[in-house]
């Protein structure tokens, strides 16, 4: 039975006030480790209420943009300090809502802190250009200006650092924000916003609206007052956003799905390759956008590699992320659970060989949650669905290939292009791989997921559209260029 009695009813934050939905509609969030625990009751905001949040962001814009960037930075630095002070508390909330382990939640917050620090500094050094005029007595320069109210739409898999990666540059550049968290992780979004509220951010600069993609999200995408949309989520939803945003010529930054390969060559350190594969396949229960979901292995080392990954995957302790000895938590909710189990069934039907896992873990208390055993399919062929579609769960497909050329070809034969990795000691092959791999982020002898805040982060093909997040482009996305010519004599 659901434990609704203790669940708190939370509010949204619009125009500097914590408010309920006027229309009184709500939704519940459930702990994926114990579906009988309601973690919170949330306003399901209507289209009209979302529109009011946009109105607040529009009204706050002139004053916020007119503050010096150093003054804007003061608010963000205070919010950052609040974040640093509350890592433990926020980590528990991420685990409660998303299911990832406490260690993984802390890693997410620490990564948010680093990215936020970096984007605050990018904001302070956002420089235009000064080039000589072709004419006498004219001084000219270019500068960046903010856009206006922007929409930030985030997913449940990184419910804390994705908002941070987007909202920090948006605010530093002088924009105001309407932020919608994923319906599966509203409390994490709420905690993020609370850090800014406690930092004294002026009313209307950051607005927080919960509710469905089809209601709240729809307005945030189609309202012509919104000047940019930064979205992270599935390719399907991202495609719809891109189409709708085009109507009002609203710019988009879409960070979407992946089917990330690790390529394993005969001359690599197989132990390292297996460790990297298992880490990136099962961390956060395979729900990183940068998770490794395909291992493409050349035949001479396939047997040994398969043995290594199988042994390592079978040692992973699955359980409630709140328990200190848990290494892999549940997947995030029943829709995810069903979808992943369906893909496992598809793998069977397609004739792939199930090496390990392949079932829902229901031992003892885990029966009430969304736990899936770390799963490996071997003998996967590139045409199979499990080799092409994003499963977004703890399922690794191993594909054997004849040689390096075939490995590259197979790795590129998907609609996605987020990240990839090759394991080899052959420098020439490593360089060839970097040249030919169709992704936005690639690696040699490293996990597919490694990224650092000073570089842009985003995919190509159906994984990413628009100027990518992080690094220099993270803030550029939220600006427009202006060039001034001044005749001074
Ligand atoms: P999703 O279903 O696409 O949802 C993402 C966000 O979009 C949620 O806030 C969702 O709201 C909202 N949304 C849904 N329909 C909408 C609509 N019609 N208009 C506007 N907004 C709408 O994705 P997800 O299931 O949360 O996240 C998993 C996906 O994210 C995976 O595909 C993963 O690869 C991708 N991802 C990519 C990256 C990257 O950087 N490339 C990073 C992380 C995750 P509701 O929750 O209310 O439906
Ligand atoms: Mg979804």
Image (tube, helix red, strand yellow):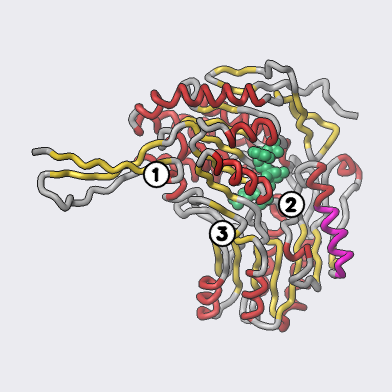
Q: Main secondary structure of the magenta part?
A: helix
Tell me if I can see residue 253 in this picture: yes
Q: Tell me the distance, in whole angstroms, between the alpha carbons under discs 1 and 2.
A: 33 Å
Residue 118 makes an appearance in the image: no
In the displayed structure, 302 sits above or below 99; it is below
Query: 14 and 484: which one is in front?
Result: 484
> Crowding at label 1, few (<14), some or many (≥20) Cα neighbours within 10 Å?
many
Q: Is residue 91 left or right of residue 353?
A: left
Dots 1, 3 in contact, CB < 8 A: no
Residue 304 screen position, x and y as percent: 75, 77
CA separation in Å, label 1 and label 3: 24 Å
- Residue density around tag 2, few if under 14, some if 14–19, many if 20 or more, within 10 Å: many
Query: Which quadrant: the C terminus?
Result: top left
Residue depicted at 83% across the width and 24% down the height: 4
**Residue 122 image label:** 1
**In-front residue for pair 377/460:** 460
The quadrant in which residue 437 appears is bottom right
Foreground residue among 409 and 158: 409
Residue assigned mark 3: 460
Q: Secondary structure at mark 2?
A: helix
Question: Against 348, is 335 above or below?
Answer: above
Q: Is residue 347 magenta?
A: yes
Task: Please determine whether, in this image, residue 183 is positioned above or below residue 265.
Answer: above
Dot 1 falls on a residue whose secondary structure is helix
Q: Quadrant of ligand 1?
A: top right
Q: Is residue 426 magenta?
A: no
Q: Residue 173: percent from the left, percent from the top?
A: 41, 37
Residue depicted at 72% across the width and 21% down the height: 9
Q: Are marks 2 and 3 in contact (CB under 8 Å)?
A: no
Q: Which residue is mark 2?
A: 285
**Left or right placement of residue 217 versus residue 230 in this view:** right
**In the rendered structure, which segment of residues is drawn in magenta?**
340-351
């Amino acid at each position: 039975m659901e434990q609704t009695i203790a669940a708190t009813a939370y509010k949204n934050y619009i125009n500097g006030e914590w408010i309920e939905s006027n229309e009184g509609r709500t939704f519940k969030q459930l702990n994926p480790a114990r579906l009988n625990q309601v973690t919170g009751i949330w306003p399901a905001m209507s289209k009209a209420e979302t529109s009011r949040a946009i109105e607040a962001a529009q009204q706050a814009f002139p004053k916020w943009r007119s503050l010096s960037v150093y003054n804007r930075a003061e608010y963000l630095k205070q919010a950052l300090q609040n974040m640093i002070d509350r890592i433990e508390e926020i980590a528990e909330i991420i685990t409660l809502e998303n299911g990832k382990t406490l260690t993984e939640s802390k890693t997410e917050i620490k990564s948010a802190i680093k990215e936020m620090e970096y984007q605050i500094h990018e904001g302070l050094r956002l420089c235009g250009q000064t080039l000589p005029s072709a004419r006498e007595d004219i001084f000219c320069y270019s500068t960046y200006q903010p856009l206006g109210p922007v929409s930030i739409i985030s997913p449940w898999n990184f419910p804390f650092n994705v908002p941070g990666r987007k909202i920090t540059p948006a605010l530093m550049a002088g924009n105001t924000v309407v932020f919608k968290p994923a319906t599966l992780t509203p409390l994490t979004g709420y905690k993020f916003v609370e850090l800014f509220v406690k930092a004294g951010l002026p009313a209307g600069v950051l607005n927080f609206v919960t509710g469905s993609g089809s209601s709240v999200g729809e307005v945030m995408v189609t309202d012509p007052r919104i000047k940019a949309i930064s979205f992270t989520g599935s390719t399907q939803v991202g495609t719809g956003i891109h189409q709708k945003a085009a109507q009002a010529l609203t710019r988009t930054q879409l960070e979407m799905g992946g089917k990330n390969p690790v390529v394993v060559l005969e001359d690599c350190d197989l132990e390292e390759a297996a460790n990297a594969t298992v880490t990136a396949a099962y961390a956060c229960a395979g729900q990183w956008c940068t998770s490794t979901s395909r291992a493409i292995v050349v035949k001479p080392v396939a047997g040994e590699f398969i043995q290594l990954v199988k042994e390592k995957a079978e040692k992973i302790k699955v359980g409630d992320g709140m328990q200190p000895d848990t290494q892999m938590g549940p997947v995030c909710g029943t829709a995810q659970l069903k979808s992943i189990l369906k893909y496992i069934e598809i793998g069977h039907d397609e004739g792939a060989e199930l090496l390990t896992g392949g079932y829902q873990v229901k031992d003892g208390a885990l029966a009430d949650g969304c736990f899936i055993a770390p799963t490996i399919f071997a003998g996967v062929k590139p045409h199979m669905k499990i080799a092409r579609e994003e499963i977004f769960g703890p399922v690794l497909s191993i594909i054997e290939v004849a040689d390096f050329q075939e490995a590259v070809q197979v790795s590129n034969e998907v609609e996605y292009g987020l990240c990839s990795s090759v394991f080899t000691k052959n420098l020439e092959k490593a360089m060839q791989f970097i040249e030919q791999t169709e992704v936005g982020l690639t690696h040699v002898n490293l996990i597919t997921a490694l990224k650092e805040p000073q570089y842009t982060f985003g995919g190509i093909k159906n994984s990413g559209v628009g100027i990518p997040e992080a690094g220099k482009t993270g803030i550029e996305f939220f600006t427009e260029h202006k060039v001034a010519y001044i005749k001074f004599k």
